[in-house]
Each structure stands twice: as structure tokens, then as C-alpha cells.
Amino acid sequence: STAEVRWANGTVGHIISSEKPDAFRGASTDFVWCDEIASWAKAEECWDNIFYGLREGESPKILITTTPSLHPLLREIEEQWPDVHITTGSTYDNIDNLPENYVKVLRKKYESSTLAKQELYGEYMMKLEGAHWQQDWIQRREVNFDDIVYKRVCVYVDPALTTGKKSDYTGISIVGK
């Protein structure tokens, strides 16, 4: 009920929910652990407040444990923090400690899917299979689009007709002539 964890050596840990980004304001600390940050609804707001409070000690640290994804915040952290260290692991690294039925369900659910690399093997999914445009295509562009005058621009939307875990993604393409 106090949202605190106290250790025998005097260390106090404060538990703060990502649902309230302002709750991170005013904290002054030397260590923060962000769990499953890629799934936080307000990750960017939380991150800003966490970062501003990380001002204690000579070398404050942040530990992020999360399923890797193409979340923009993860990419930003990786690019802006030169001393970031990424450690990855696979579900199979821990297989001896997992219940057999759990592993069976994981394999059945993900093994033949495109998410297996992310969910089972802990790898960044740099490409979404089936997407009309891939991130690396856009990043390595060689044309300066600022100087182009378009005669016509078309936006194509292929909406998902259902919402749910097995629904298709909504596809959006923009083409200029």
C-alpha cells in the first residue's frame, strides 16, 4: 500500500506506475528500473520525467527490461545514449525453469509466426513481414524530398475490418507524382 520496498541496508525502492507519468516528477535518484517500457501507453512522457530525476551519484543507471520492439522510444534511447549496453536473451535460455505446458503454448502460439524472433528469441524485429514499406528503405533514402514539387498525391488506406488479436493491420500508403 505504500508503493515502497525497503531493504535491510537502508535502500528504499519506490514503485511508480507508467499510467501516471507525472508521478515520476520530483524524484531524485541514482537508479531506475523500467520494466516492459515498450508496452507503456505514455512511455515518452514517463521517460522524460524519469530522465530528469536521474541526478544522484556519480554514475546514475537505468535498467530497462522489455520485449524488444520497434517502439520509437527504444530507438531514441539507443541512439542518444552512447554508453547504452544491450543484452538480449531468448525464452529458450530459461527453458529449464519454465513449466512444460507454458513452453508448449508459447511454441504453438509463436513458433511459426513472424513474431517468434521477438517473442521467443528476444530479437528486434526490424521488418514487419508483408508491409509495403520497410523501415530500412526509408532510412537509407538517397533523394532529398524537400525540393520536389508534387503534381499529384494519393493516399491509399486498406482498413482492418475487425479489431482483435488476429485482425489484419490497417495499411496506409502515400504516393506522389
Image: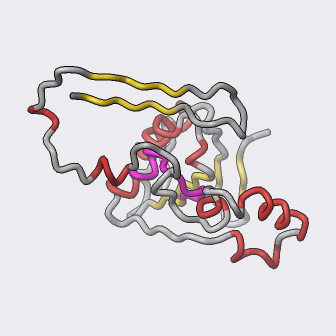
Q: Nearer the viewer, residue 123 or 54?
A: 123
User: The N terminus is located in which quarter?
Assistant: top right
Magenta segment includes 173: no
Count of marks, rendered view: 0
Q: Quadrant of residue 114?
A: bottom right
Tell me: 171 left or right of 145.
right
In the displayed structure, would residue 71 be above or below residue 106?
Answer: above
Residue sitting at x 40%, y 64%: 84
Q: Considering depth in this image, is 104 or 151 the residue closer to the camera?
A: 151
Give the x, y percent position of residue 152: 23, 20
Give x and y (percent) for residue 19: 62, 33
Tell whether 11 sits left or right of 142.
Answer: right
Residue at coordinates 65% horizontally, 61% vertically from top-left? 116
Q: Is residue 73 magenta?
A: yes
Percent coordinates x, y for residue 166 in the rendering: 71, 40
Q: Quadrant of residue 160?
A: top right
x, y percent for residue 103: 82, 67
Toward the viewer: 81 or 28?
81
- The magenta-colored residue range is 64-75
Q: Is residue 38 above or below residue 9?
A: above
With 63 as the anchor, is 55 left or right in this view?
left
Which residue is painted at 43% across and 46% down in the image?
A: 51
